[in-house]
């Protein structure tokens, strides 16, 4: 289950997620989230294994508001005995007293959006916290939480290989069990794209990002973190159960404005507008659109998600779920990447090689099926 909290203190220059910097409708929206949870309680068959508060900035909610949402979930859904419940949080919201308050809730995992431990990077991205807050909040969080993840961004304009390596060294010395590291991407309609177009900020260099990713693979391996998915690194027992469920193609329910849901056969998404979302939910209507997925859509999605993980793509699964024509097509398309040592075929499973890792999305796209006819 994913809960989207669409509020932020300020807009990061690179972000294109749905959020508002006005908190005027925060209590109304929390009430609407709870009403949507009740309206959709028949959509989940079986147990809720993970609950993820994303955004936006979920740590802007009070502990009472978070508890209201969790109480609604527990009252209307069957939750597993040991669920993973993650709260995305920004360092400037995680004072020692606030972290302590979270321990009184059912939240058992924190995902902290550090992005960088250097002031120049944080200023370029327009983050609301500074480097000292980033360090202190992690030290405070470790007093109360064992399961902590840090988000970092590489490929930032002006970030040298040395500074990226220093960023990683700081994170690894803090001895948190999980890192999520993402290449900076320039999204349309973001402030960062406009700054680059005006020459205020230099463009993102893909070759630099590739070098940073190679450093990331090397440093995390030395530290004993497993690269279980392209952007995610965890100690044994600390892989994100929520994210792993997405990559394994499990169904999920997305609650809140702009949140997406997936039931194995179709995908739906809520309107990305807080006011319209609240009005619709108050009227007892779901503000969502739905798309039924074709067999080709589901095959392509499995290829994309499977190749990003350490488990790879099972040819046996492709044949059993999609048919022999699909597995034959996949092997034909994979021939060149295998020959060029970008893909490895072992035990009837296709996996990205170390050489091909940074190119995994492009390799996956070459294996996609547009039309079998």
Image (spheres, rainbow, N blue to C red):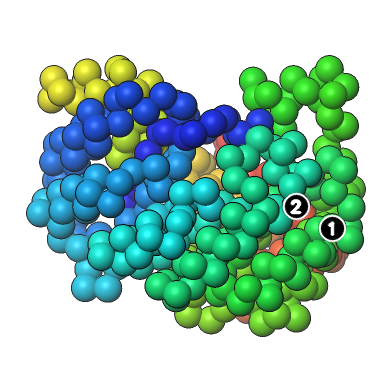
Picture layout, residue 142 above or below residue 186:
below
Tell which of 267 and 238 is nearer to you.
238
Q: Quadrant of residue 281?
A: top left
**Quadrant (top left/top right/bottom left/bottom right) for the C terminus:** top right
Q: Residue at x 48, y 80 (%)?
A: 237
Q: Earlier in the sequence, mark 1 or mark 2?
A: 2
Instruction: Relative to 194, say whether 148 is above or below.
Output: below
Which residue position is annotated with label 1? 163
Residue at the image position 47 percent from the left and 67 percent from the top: 141
Name the residue located 75 percent from the left edge and 61 percent from the top edge: 167
Q: Check disc 2 and report the residue beneath it.
A: 118
Q: Is residue 314 left or right of residue 159?
A: left
Q: Please state if 164 lies on the left or on the right of 23 as rendered.
A: right
Labels 1 and 2 touching (C-beta < 8 A): yes
Give the percent coordinates (x, y) of residue 274: 34, 23
User: In the rendering, at what x and y percent does residue 63 appear?
Assistant: 28, 52
Mark 2 is surrounded, within 10 Å at the Cα level, by few (under 14), some (14 to 19) or many (20 or more) other residues, namely some
- Along the line of sight, the residue nearer the viewer: 373 or 218: 218
Residue 315: x and y in percent read 57, 65
Element class at badge 2: loop
* Label 1 crowd bin: few (<14), some (14–19), many (20+), radius 10 Å: some
Which residue is at the front of the view, 332 or 183? 183
Q: Quadrant of residue 75?
A: bottom left
Label placed on residue 14: none
């Amino acid at each position: 289950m994913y809960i989207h909290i669409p509020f932020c203190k300020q807009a990061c220059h690179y972000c294109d997620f749905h959020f508002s910097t006005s908190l005027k409708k925060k209590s109304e929206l929390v009430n609407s989230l709870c009403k949507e949870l009740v309206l959709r309680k028949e959509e989940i068959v079986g147990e809720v294994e993970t609950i993820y508060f994303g955004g936006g900035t979920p740590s802007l909610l009070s502990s009472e508001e978070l508890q209201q949402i969790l109480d609604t979930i527990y009252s209307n859904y069957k939750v597993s005995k040991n669920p993973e419940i993650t709260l995305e949080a920004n360092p400037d919201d995680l004072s020692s007293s606030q972290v302590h308050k979270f321990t009184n809730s059912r939240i058992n995992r924190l995902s902290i959006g550090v992005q960088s431990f250097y002031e120049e990077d944080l200023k370029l991205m327009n983050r609301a916290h500074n480097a000292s807050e980033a360090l202190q909040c992690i030290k405070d969080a470790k007093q109360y939480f064992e399961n902590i993840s840090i988000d970092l961004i590489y490929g930032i304009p002006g970030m040298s290989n040395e500074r990226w390596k220093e960023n990683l060294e700081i994170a690894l010395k803090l001895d948190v069990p999980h890192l999520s590291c993402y290449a900076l991407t320039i999204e349309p309609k973001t402030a960062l794209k406009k700054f680059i177009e005006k020459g205020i900020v230099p463009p993102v260099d893909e070759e630099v990002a590739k070098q940073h990713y190679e450093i990331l693979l090397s440093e995390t391996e030395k530290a004993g973190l497993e690269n279980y998915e392209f952007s995610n690194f965890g100690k044994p027992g600390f892989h994100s159960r929520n994210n792993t469920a997405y990559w394994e193609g499990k169904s999920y329910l997305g609650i809140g404005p702009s949140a997406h849901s997936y039931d194995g056969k179709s995908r739906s998404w809520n309107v990305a507008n807080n006011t319209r979302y609240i009005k619709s939910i108050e009227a007892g209507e779901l503000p969502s659109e739905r798309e039924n997925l074709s067999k080709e859509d589901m095959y392509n999605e499995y290829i994309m998600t499977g190749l990003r993980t350490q488990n790879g793509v099972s040819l046996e699964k492709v044949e059993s779920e999609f048919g022999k024509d699909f597995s034959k097509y996949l092997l034909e398309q994979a021939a060149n990447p295998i020959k060029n040592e970008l893909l490895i075929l072992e035990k009837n499973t296709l996996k990205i090689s170390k050489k091909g890792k940074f190119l995994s999305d492009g390799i996956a796209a070459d294996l996609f099926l547009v039309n079998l006819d």
